[in-house]
Image (cartoon, rainbow, N blue to C red):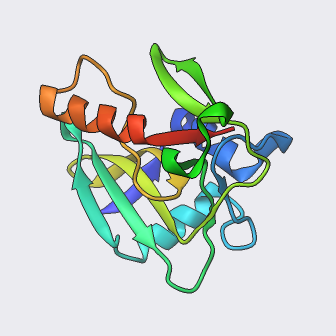
Amino acid sequence: MKYCISDHALQHVNKHFNVNGKLDGSKFNLELFSTPSELITFCNSNQPYEMLMQENGREAHIFKLIDSIVGKCAIDLKQNYSEKSIYLEDIDGYVIQCVKSDILPNTNQFCLIVQPNKEKYDIITMYPGEYAPPLPNSKFSKEFNEFCIVFWESNVLLV
């Protein structure tokens, strides 16, 4: 199946590609993939390294490039930072741990979160870095929500 992206999802994804001069969160290496279209073309001709099931039938497709830096990741292990450097921020009703950082770690992986349909994968979002589950939400099953909570309690968002 082919990967496709809606205009709405593209607006969200563009922030990882420095569109309109705004670079926010995780950042793709623009020398490797200068636009979301280039990344989607790559994905349509390569297989994911790993595929994970999420809630509501969504899937995480993880791609890994052995010899390339795909970009910079805005999520890191909490243990890598002092408690003094961590502050809390409310994002979509969930309080997460954040660290101000001018330097983001390099990554050779990126993720596509997709909704499979009969003929295509609709891209919800894509970002450089290892798989990160969504923020916890009471709409999720108890097990998946606990998985999300554990992840976000042991990681920080680099801003």
Q: In this image, 151 relative to 87: left or right?
A: left
Q: Quadrant of the C terminus?
A: top right
Tell me the residue at 14%/26% (across/down).
142
**Residue farthest to the bottom, as pictured:** 67
| Left or right: residue 135 compared with residue 8 | left
Residue 159 left/right relative to 49: right
Q: Please state which of residues 153 and 121 is positioned toward the viewer in this rendering.
A: 153
Q: How many numbered dots are placed on residues in this image? A: 0
Image coordinates for residue 37, horizontal then vertical, percent = 60, 59
Q: Is residue 72 visible?
A: yes
User: Where residue 35 sits: x, y (%)?
Assistant: 68, 59
- Position of residue 1 relative to residue 158, above or below, is below
* Image point (26%, 42%), residue name: 58
Q: Position of residue 70 (x, y in %)?
A: 60, 69
In the displayed orientation, state which residue is furthest to the right. 21
Of residue 123 and residue 81, the one placed in the foreground of this image is 81
When asked about the image quadrant of residue 148, the answer is top left
Between 128 and 48, which is closer to the camera in this rendering?
128
Q: Residue at x 21, y 25 (%)?
A: 140
Image coordinates for residue 1, horizontal then vertical, percent: 29, 63
Image height check: is 146 above or below 133?
A: above
Q: Residue at x 34, y 59 (%)?
A: 61
In this view, the residue in front, 82 or 68, is 82
Q: Quadrant of residue 137?
A: top left
